Amino acid sequence: MPDRDVNHRVRTPVSPGTRATVRPARRFVSDPGTKAQGHPPRVRRAIALACVLGVALLGASDALNLYDRIVSWGKLVHAAEGFLVASVAAYLLIAYRDREQPGVHTQVVALMSMLVGVTFGACWEFLAFVLDWIRHSDLQKSNTDTVTDMLSNDLAAVLGALLALHAYYHWTRPAAQREVSDLAAWLFNPIGRLLDARGKLLAAFVLLGIAVYCTALWYAERALPLVAPQ
């Protein structure tokens, strides 16, 4: 097996009395760590393309008023967005797991990826509710519409996570897996350092935000205390 370390050097054996020479180890083309010069980062481009497609789908749907023109278009958009978010999360998380070796099972990574997609769908509906509340719009047509949107998102998130994990292990080459792991480390390592340094403070802010949100929901259709009703 060729050595994977580029900087590894081999000491050439010489006869007694002769000065030893050091030469760089030769890297063979069969080494999966070798990258062809000029080879485009396909995996990063694919992930970036998934993010662009998600944003473009939202923008085009709103600009062309497709939600009103096509029946159940919102369900399709929710499913597509949940699928993209969960699949990208699964791809990055499994690559990061393989790089850092934290001892997390693949099933746990799959569950985490699904939860990322489910959380995305829930936050989307929360945002739609707040916008309807503030702007008096009708993004959420009814309770049935809201629940079916979330179900579409959740089912697509489960499917996206499973397909992404299958693609990572069966369709992705080792060199591409290392490329994804490098991208995942670039994204997640700063977050880990931030949580190590300010984890309690961030948790307090999150809890405060949840408390404020729940309080706002409670008084959405009620009179505020110490304020005379109009």
Image: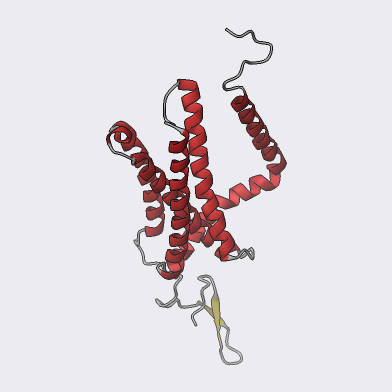
Give the position of the C terminus as an image quadrant.
top right
Instruction: Report the side of 183 relative to 80 (left or right).
Output: right
In this view, 146 is above or below 11: above
Image point (34%, 41%), residue name: 72
Image point (62%, 15%), residue name: 223
In this view, 29 is above or below 124: below
Instruction: Report the side of 20 relative to 175 (left or right).
Output: right
In this view, 161 is above or below 193: below
Comparing 18 with 219, the one in front is 219
- Residue 40, percent from left and from top: 35, 59
Number of labels in the image equals 0
Image point (53%, 49%), residue name: 116
Coloration of the structure image: secondary structure
- Residue 5, percent from left and from top: 53, 72
Determine which quarter of the picture holds residue 12. Answer: bottom right
Considering every residue shown, the one lying at the far front of the view is 144
- Residue 191, percent from left and from top: 60, 47
Comparing 65 with 230, the one in front is 230
Instruction: Report the side of 199 relative to 13 (left or right).
Output: right
